[in-house]
Image (spheres, rainbow, N blue to C red):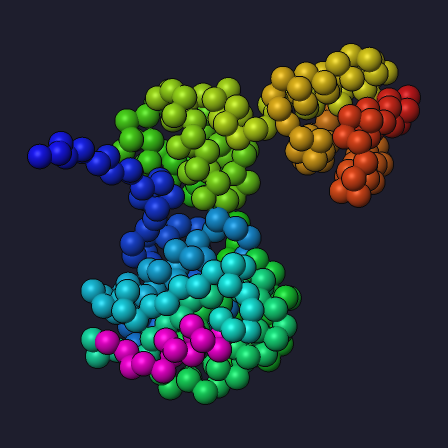
Amino acid sequence: MSEVKEVKILEKPWVEKYRPEKLNDIVGQEHIVKRLTHYVKTSSMPHLLFAGPPGVGKTTAALCLAKEIYGEHWRQNFLELNASDERGINVIREKVKEFARTKPIGGASFKIIFLDESDALTQDAQQALRRTMEMFSNNVRFILSCNYSSKIIEPIQSRCAIFRFRPLNDEDVAKRLRYIAENEGLELTEDGLQALLYVAEGDMRRAINVLQAAAALDTKITDENVFIVASRARPEDVREMMVLALEGNFLKARDKLREILLKQGLSGEDVLIQMHKEVFNLPISEPKKVKLADKIGEYNFRLVEGAHEMIQLEALLAQFTLLGK
């Protein structure tokens, strides 16, 4: 007999492992949770449009809503499609209509179709969706999730109750990160926590992913580990580079730039984004901050257009030196 090999079961990503199961477990969106809970209690709801930045709970809210409405039958009554992958009219004509035609299971009065990243749907697909929403409104409710509601055509917006998700504040993200670190047996230092919050910028998904990546390096989560796995420069290094340029030490600022780019492996656009974030923390006058922010925007456009990273960033530092005089 051949030897049976043991198959190692991979652990879920922490984003999925620690995804809330109930609406009341969702943090930072209390006004939305309250409205969705009302739909659960009344077993009645309109079509919904979730709009907001990434990682703030849009997908989680849709999943929790389905679980609380349908209980153990939620998988049979809930269809999730990622519209950025399946964005054509055929998806609406085939998958959505096929699911919408069948009756709900478990005594529910309607099914739910969740279209994630629906702002990636083509105009033709959105027009087809508009008609489908009308035809199957007795049997199906749609939840559309998007980053930019302006990319959803007006006829669809008018058919939906719009929920605007806001970026999570640092207190809510920190509370969740401490909970995960405790459950995973990690030592989360205060510097490490602040680094995670700096990198996350209100995005819970990004914060949890970076925490998991940092935990692969060491069970002690420090700011150094966080910036390494997140491919970010330390804020103080970026500020030091800009201050050197403003003080007229162009060559030292240039050396600092090369250290950030080459040793830490950052892209030019990554550095520009951090420079834009840190320019408002510099000890300079308001008019100078305005001029520097304007210059950063100009050089960001140059990089987007395909200009050479190192040349453009050094030219930007030269502008800092000129403006610092």
Q: Is residue 242 magenta?
A: no
* Image location (x, y in percent) of residue 203: 50, 44
Q: Which residue is nearer to you in this view: 83 or 107?
A: 83
Q: Is residue 4 above or below residue 68?
A: above
User: Taking the image as drawn, is residue 301 in sight?
Assistant: no
* Residue 91 x %, y %: 49, 71
Q: Residue at x 35, y 46 (%)?
A: 16
What type of secondary structure mainly makes up the magenta span?
A: helix
Tell me where residue 179 appears, x and y as whole percent.
Answer: 32, 36
Which quadrant would the C terminus be assigned to in this image? top right
Q: Residue at x 55, y 53 (%)?
A: 53
Residue depicted at x 13% and y 34%: 2
Foreground pick, 45 / 306? 306
Task: Give x and y (percent) for residue 196.
Answer: 48, 32
Residue 266 in view of the camera: yes
- Is residue 36 found left or right of 120 in the rendered image? left
Q: Quadrant of residue 66?
A: bottom left
4 with respect to 233 (left or right): left
Q: Would residue 94 be counted in the magenta stretch?
A: yes
Residue drawn at x 27%, y 33% as measured from the top left: 183
**In terms of image quadrants, where is residue 279?**
top right
Bounds of the magenta span?
A: 92-105
Q: Quadrant of the N terminus?
A: top left
Looking at the image, residue 84 lies above or below residue 246: below
Residue ranking furthest to the front: 1
